[in-house]
Image: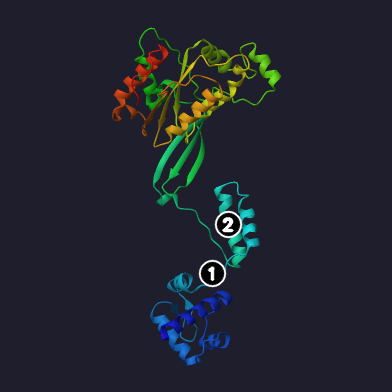
Amino acid sequence: MAQSRRMLVLRAVVEDYIRSQEPVGSTTLTRDHDLGVSSATVRNDMAALEDEGYLIQPHTSAGRVPTEKGYRYFVDRLATVVPLSEAQRRGINSFLSGSVSLKDALQRSARLLSEITGQVAVVASPSLAKATLRHVEMVPVAMTTLLAVVITDTGRVAQHGLTIASMPAVDETNRLSNTVWIGRQVLQKLTSPFSFREVSLQNGTIQDCRGCSYTACLHFAQRHTCFYGGAISTEIIPAIENCDAMLFLCPNYNDAVSANIMALFNRLTNLLTQRDLYDKYLFGIVVSGYSGSDLVAQQLMGAMCFNKTTMLPPCFCLMQTAHDPDSAKNMPDIQERIQAFPANMESVLLGRGVKKTY
């Protein structure tokens, strides 16, 4: 009973101190709270709470104030949780949904918490100094601009734009690319009578489609070009029109194809105003750091087969996991897979059927 009463005394001290910011005495507690005991008994309970580390006395004649231990016990055991009304919930959701960044969300949360409680509110994000890096990726967004994406073990994602003097040479970045390495290994194993042409979509070379009218799109398509021009008109459309099969090299970007490949999918719409692609086969190589290759393969299949009418052969895609740069060559069974994939491409293109799956 005495222990239970002491906790009631502790709650009363914390509540009064929060309200007045003045040391709380036994007489005040007896007057303002229905504790059912005398002022002398309350003083004894406060002395016991001080001995246990829940309260302190600033000086001999003063009342008591809560310690950090007292506040923690109050929050964990004694504080009464008041449920939010439906109107409050709607207001909170509406207020926080307008956040445009992590910093803005934290500022809104602190302001909202302070208004609801009538107290000073401090909201902090997880400390990056104590976090462990889970993934770092550098994404080229322009010729002299990189986007650095950092993901920590707490799930926090930070993005920062970096300006550099010049982009690394394409050959240098290709040397470390697992996707490019696998693709070139596959192409080297294609035997006569096959030949291939490599078209690079790196470093923002493809401007995304902005949605011309059908009449304008048809006008340029009849001339085997596109209103926006660029590599689509000079390299890609002629290469697709003259090929028997397309092999897409697709690194996994957040379980999706890269922005350049997506822009290519969109820009190929004008090609379909003139002809179908049902006489051309689709193949793909997808490399992921952890998982999600199947999602990228489905996106490739949906864009080029279901939407652009290309033929989809069995086992059309080689999917590989390789997280670190230039690490694909060391993955288990990679050489066997690189042998099997071009063999199946040859079988499909020569009409012999698929011999092996992988």
Callout 2: SS? helix
Q: Quadrant of residue 54?
A: bottom left
Q: Residue 101 at what x, y percent from top left? A: 57, 47
Residue drawn at x 44%, y 82% is 4
Q: Is residue 232 above or below residue 161?
A: above
Q: Earlier in the sequence, mark 2 or mark 1?
A: 1
Looking at the rendered structure, the kind of residue marked 1 is: Val
Task: Tell me if 52 is positioned left or right of 227 in this view.
Answer: left
User: Which corner quadrant holds the C terminus?
Assistant: top left
Q: Residues within 10 Å of mark 2 (few under 14, many from 20)?
A: many
Q: Residues within 10 Å of mark 1 (few under 14, many from 20)?
A: few
Colour style of the rendered protein structure = rainbow
Q: Residue 58 at what x, y percent from top left? A: 47, 80
Callout 1: SS? loop
Task: Tell me if 249 is positioned left or right of 21 in this view.
Answer: left
Q: Which mark is residue 81?
A: 1
Q: Residue 75 at what x, y percent from top left? A: 48, 70
Looking at the rendered structure, the kind of residue marked 2 is: Ser
Task: Tell me if 238 is positioned left or right of 221 in this view.
Answer: left
Task: Tell me if 157 is positioned left or right of 115 in this view.
Answer: left
Q: Which residue is tagged 2?
A: 109
Which of the pair 288/340 is nearer the observer?
Answer: 340
Residue drawn at x 56%, y 63% is 121
